[in-house]
Image (cartoon, coloured by chain):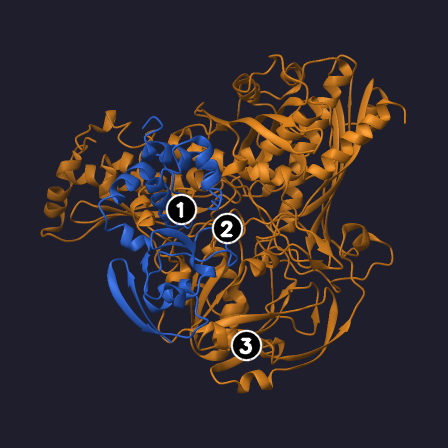
Chain colours: A blue, B orange
Amino acid sequence: MEIELIVNGRPVAARLEPQQLLLDFLRDDLGLTGTKRSCDVQVCGACTVLLDGLPVSSCCTLAVEAHGRDVLTIEGLAERDEFAAIERAFARHAAVQCGYCTPGLVLTIHALLAEGALATEDGIRRNLAGNLCRCTGYKAIVEAVRELAGTGNP
Amino acid sequence: MSTKVETATRAGTAVGLPLERVDAGEKLRGQARFTGDLDVGRMLHGKVMRSPLPHARIVSLDASRAERLAGVVCVLTGRDLLDLPSPLYGHALKDRPIVAIDRVRFAGEPVAVVAAEDEATAEAALALIDVEYEELPAAVTIEEALAPDAPLLHEGPQRAGLFHGLGELGEREGNVCYRYHIDRGEIEAAFAHADVVVEGEYTFPAVYQYALETHTVIAEHRPDEITVWASCQHPFLVRAELADLFGLPLHRVRLIVPYLGGGFGSKSYTKMEPITVAVARKAGRPVRIRNRVDEAMLTTRRHGLRCRMRTSATAEGRLLGREVELWLDTGAYADNGPRVTATGGDAAPGPYRWAAYRVDAACVYTNTSPSGSYRAFGATHVQWIGESQVDEVARRCGLDPLELRRQNLCVTGEELRAGGKPLDADLIGDVEKVAEAIGWGRPRQRWRGRGLSVGLLAAGAHPVSNATVRLESDGIAVVLVGTTEKGQGARTVMAQIAAEELGLPLERVRVQGADTRYTPYDRSTGASRSTTLAGLAVQRAARDVRDQLARIAGSDPDPDEYVALMRRHFGFAGGELIGVGEVRPRGTGSYAEGPVFWEVCVGAAEVEIDPETGVVTVLRTATVADVGRAINPKLVERQDEGATLQGIGNALFEEMLWIDGQLANGDLLEYRIPTLRDMPAEMTCIVVENGDGPGPYGAKGCGEGALAAIPAAIVNALADAGVPMTELPLTPERVWRRIRELEKEATGG
C-alpha cells in the first residue's frame, strides 16, 4: 500500500505492507529510533507518538492508519521551542534515569499539558498512569510535571 | 561552576552536588542509542522457538521445512553445538546448554533459533520446525522438586562455572543445586531458655524484573573473533563465558554495551548472548535477537521462596535465637541461584545481637523458567519475614517495636558474621529517622498501621575494578570505565568523581560506555558496587593524572593551565596523560572476608486497609539511603524512590503464576507493575552521610536497600493494623480472606 503523511512537520510518502505497525515504520523505515518498543500490548506507553496531536501507542497502530495524518515523534518535538521547558524540568528534577520510557512519556506530557489535563494532582495520577517507568518511582516525573503545569515549586 | 580551584580546597567542585545527569539531554531528545537502535551491516534477525512442555525428551527435530522458507538463512539447533568444547554455560554452575540438546527442562526453553532477513520471516518459520517430544514427569514447585520420588532435572557431577565463588562443590543431592549453612552459638539453648517464641511458615512469590528494554543482543562471529553488542550489565563476565564456550582468548571476544533501558539484575551475568553468538556463527552473518516481554519473563526472574523461621526472646524483649530454613526456586538452571541463596542466608538473621542463630538455605531446581538476580535479592526475600517476627516479639513483650530494635540492633563495629566485615553503619540512627518521618508513635485511625524494618544486604560482589582517565591535549578528560549505564546514573557519578579530582567542570569530563576492547576491566554492574569500587578506581586514575600534571608543573597546577602544561610536556599540541586506577581485594577476596560493605535496608511505611475489599493503600513511606557520602544526592534519592515503588509492587501485587508448568500471566496485560497511581502520597528518602564507606570520599553503594526494606515495612504496617500476613503478595483477596479468618477466630467461630 502507499501512504502519505506528515512526520515531524515534513511530508513523507511510503510503500508498505498493510500489516506494518506504525512503530516499525517509524523505527525501521524512517530511522526514528527515539520511539521505543517494550510491551507490545499498549500497556507501557514507551512507543507513544502523537497522531494529529493525540497520544497513541504506535505498537498497536497500523502505519496505514496514519495515512493523511500528522505524526509527531520525540525527534520532532525536540526541534520545537516548547521542548526547552520540558527538557529543563526533566533534567533539573532528574526525572530521567534509563531513558527508555522518556520519549513516550515526554510526548504524552506535552499533549496533556496543552489540554490542561495535568493541572491537578489527580489529573497527573490518572492521566500519566498509562506510561510505565520502572526506574524513577514517578516522584521526579510528578515534580517535573508540576513545574511545567505551573502548579508546583520549581 | 568555577574552574579555578586550588587542590587543597577543591572539595565541592562536583562531588556532593545534585548536578544534572550528563545523559539527560540525549535521552530526552530520543538520541540515546540502545542495542535495539543499532543496525550493523548485513544483520539478520533471530527468533527463538521455545519448548511448549515443562519437561520432555526431544525425540526428533526437523527444521528442513523452515530452512526452505524464502528469507530464512539458517536454523540453529542442539546439533550445531557438537563441535564446541562444551555447550554448557552458567557462571555459577555450568548446567545450561546454549540451546536444548536432547531435553527441555521448562516451558519456554529455547529449542531452536531461526535467522532470517527480517523478524516476520523468522517468526513465520518457527511454525515450520517439526519437533517431537516425549513428555517427562515434571516438578514445577519446590515441594514437588524435593519429594523423594521427584524427577531429577540434572544428573551427573556438578560442574563449577567460571565465577562459582562459593567454595567447594558438594555431591549432587537430588534437585538441590546449592546449600548454604550458618551455625552460630548454641541454638538449642537459645530456644530452651526463651520466654517468647514466634514461629511461622512464609511464601514469597516469583517476580519479574521488567526492565522496559528487553534483552537485546547483536552478535557477529568470525572464525577467530566474536563481537557482541548487548544490553548486558556485566560485559566482562559475559566476555569470559563466551570465550570459554567458543574456545577463544579473552581479547578475541568484544562486548560493546550501549545505554541499557533498565536492568535491575535481569541483565546481569549471561543471558541471551551465547544463543545469539551460536546462531551468528552458523549464519556467517551478524544476527540480532530481541526478546519480547513474554520471552524476557522466561529468560530470568526473581526466585520464589518458601521459608520456615522461628525467633526467641526473653520476656523483657531481648532477642535470643533465630532458626531459619529457606528454599529458593531457581527454576530449571542455576543462573545466579547459589549466590541469591547465600545472600538470603546472610540476610536472614537480621542485624541483631543474637545469642545464637542457624540458617539452612537450599537452592532448588524446578521445571520452571530460570531465576537469577533482581535488585536486593536475598534481602528482599527474607527481611519481611524476620522483621515481622521481631515485631511479633515486641507485641508479645508489650514493647514498642522501635524500642525493641534500639535494644537489640548491632552497633557500628560489631561483628555480624564470623570472620566477615563488621557492621559499618548506624542502624539505630537510621531506623529512628524513618520512624520520625512517618509519624511513629502518633495516634492512628482503625485499619491504618505503621511498620518499620531494618536489614542488611551483603554488597559489592568481588572487589575488582580498573579504570583509566585520559587527559586529552584539549584539556578534556575521558574516563574509561567498564560500568554500564542502566539508568542509575553511573556515567554522571563517574564524571563527578573525575571532575572533582582534576578540578574540572563536569562538561570537560566525558565518560565512555563499556567496550571490552578498550575499557579496562570491571567485574560487574550490580550489587550496588559501582560508585564504591569502579568509582574508587576512577578516583585513583584521576589522581594519577593529577600527580603527573604536578610533576610536569613542579607544583599542583591550576586546571586552566592543563593545556599549556601538556603542550610543553609533549612539545606540540598532541599527546595525552593516562592515569590508571586499580581496585582489588585486600585479603584473598574470598566471600567469607566480605562483603565490601553492608548495604543498609531501612524503611518505614504507613498503610490503610479497606476491610470490605482487602485493598491495601500505601499512604507514606520513608527510606534511608545510608551512603557514607552522596556523590550526587539527587541521584541517591531517585534510586531510593525507584526501589520503593518496586518494593510496593513486590509486596502488594507482583507475582508470576504457573499452571501445569506454564507461565499463566506472561505479559504486561496480566502481570501488573506499579503505575503512577501506586505512588504513595508521601515518599521520603533520607540521605545519611556518615563517611563510613570504603569507596571514594567515604561513599558506599545504595539503590537496593529500599527494595528489601519496603515490603517488610508494609507487612509490619498491616500487622500493626491487625492483619498479620505470611504470604506475599498482599493481594486484596489474600488480605480479605485473612481479615475474615481473624474475625472468625475473634468470635470463636
Q: Secondary structure at mark 3?
A: helix
Q: Residues within 10 Å of mark 1 (few under 14, many from 20)?
A: many
Q: Position of residue B644 (x, y in %)?
A: 53, 34
**Three-letter amino acid code at disc 2?**
Ala
Question: Foreground: B650 or B355?
Answer: B650
Report the disc number at residue B127. none
Marks 1 and 2 sit apart, C-alpha to C-alpha, by: 16 Å
Would you name the residue on which mark 2 appears? B211
Q: What chain letter is assigned to the residue under label 1?
A: A
Q: Residues within 10 Å of mark 3 (few under 14, many from 20)?
A: some
Q: Position of residue B329 (x, y in %)?
A: 71, 50
Question: Foreground: B558 or B3?
Answer: B3
Residue at 37 percent across and 51 percent down: it is: A54
Would you name the residue on which mark 3 appears? B124
Question: In the displayed structure, would residue B740 be above or below residue B209?
Answer: above
Determine whether, in the image, residue B589 is placed left or right of residue B364: left
Q: Secondary structure at mark 1?
A: helix
Question: Foreground: B450 or B194?
Answer: B450
**Three-letter amino acid code at disc 3?**
Ala
Residue at 90 percent across and 27 percent down: it is: B749
Would you name the residue on which mark 1 appears? A105
Can residue B187 be seen at all in this image of the molecule? Answer: no
